[in-house]
Image (cartoon, helix red, strand yellow):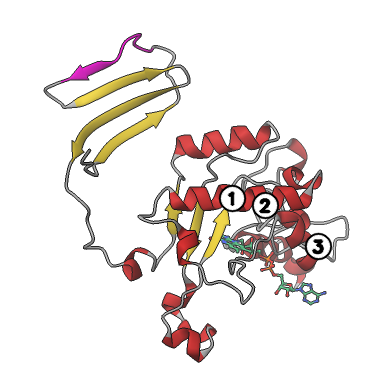
Amino acid sequence: MPILPGKGYSLTMPRPALCPTHPLIFEEHRVAVTPMQSGYRLGSMMEFVGFDDSVRPERAFAGTFHANESASQLQRAYDEASSGALPSVPPCEFYCHTLTDSTILAPPLRAAGVQTLTAFGLHMPTRLFVADPDAARDAALAATLRSIDSVLAEPIEDCLLRTPDGAPCVEVRTPLDIEDELRMPGGNIFHRDLQWPFAEHEDEVGTWGAQTDDPRVLLCGAGARRGGGVSAIAGHNAAMALLLSPAGRAA
Ligand SMILES: Cc1cc2nc3c(=O)[nH]c(=O)nc-3n(C[C@H](O)[C@H](O)[C@H](O)COP(=O)(O)OP(=O)(O)OC[C@H]3O[C@@H](n4cnc5c(N)ncnc54)[C@H](O)[C@@H]3O)c2cc1C
């Protein structure tokens, strides 16, 4: 049977409190409404445009490639991780650093057109890896490859280099591995869960989120309130705490 690829456009969201009981089609707007048990989808036109090879892979992979990171997919992965399971389709993003800087490859690999790819999985907290780290690492790899494959024209595994003994050139680091190797708490890229920049408790009001029990020590990195991420908020807050302290005012 001939099969045609299609591009559909839809928006999936949590089921609203007031929800139609049957699917609806608004013909004049060409919008279909699908109420589901656990969600609500607005869909629109479908395009049958054939395979589109006009986008060069170098362009598609030049930035951050987001896979399965819609709000509903992130929510599902979060819910699965909260219930103690690895996300079935992990939201992930990947980068091909060698497209920007191929000098990180040995010359023969560069000449052969080899690329590196870093995939970064979301909603895989440390606790999911504690009971059986090796099995969980394997499962996380399999799930992440599935997630990547879901947005590619051909399976990524067919494109992987192999070691002389035939193993795929894939290196997997779980949050536990990162904690062991780099001492990053919980393998968290932000060193801990992100926090809002504003005070959430009475005792934080009037502080900069940078103070510690020792008045001579201020946090200016990821450990401060809203310190994680490349935000520079923590450095700003530590400077303000210093400038507005009695010592800072005297100087
Ligand atoms: C792969 C990855 C991707 C990320 N992507 C993003 C992103 O897209 N957006 C975003 O906002 N954030 C991102 N982050 C998070 C962000 O990079 C961190 O939250 C941020 O860099 C933390 O800043 P910091 O200054 O507290 O710590 P760091 O940047 O970790 O700096 C700590 C410094 O202290 C040094 N150090 C440690 N111990 C000692 C010692 N004993 N003596 C002297 N020096 C020491 C370290 O070498 C390091 O240079 C990412 C992190 C990772 C790992």
Q: Quadrant of the N terminus?
A: top left
What residue would you read off at disc 3? Answer: 180
Horizontal side, residue 245 vs residue 9: left or right: right
- What segment is highlighted magenta in the picture? 19-26
What residue would you read off at disc 1? Answer: 142
Mark 1 touches mark 2? (CB < 8 Å):
yes
**Residue at mark 1: C-beta within 8 A of ligand 1:** no
20 falls in the magenta region: yes
Instruction: Give the structural element (helix, strand or loop) at label 2.
Output: helix
Instruction: Give the structural element (helix, strand or loop) at label 1.
Output: helix
Q: CA distance from mark 3 to mark 2?
A: 18 Å
Relative image position of residue 143 (x, y in whole percent): 57, 47
Relative image position of residue 125 (x, y in whole percent): 69, 46
Q: Nearer the viewer, mark 3 or mark 2?
A: 2
Determine the residue positioned at 55% across, 45% down. Answer: 90
Q: Which mark is residue 138?
A: 2
Q: Earlier in the sequence, mark 1 or mark 3?
A: 1
Q: Nearer the viewer, mark 1 or mark 3?
A: 1
Determine the residue positioned at 21% across, 26% down. Answer: 31
Q: Quadrant of the C terminus?
A: bottom right
Q: Is residue 122 shown above or below 14?
A: below
Callout 1: 10 Å neighbours few (<14), some, many (20+)? Answer: few
Q: Earlier in the sequence, mark 3 or mark 2?
A: 2
48 falls in the magenta region: no
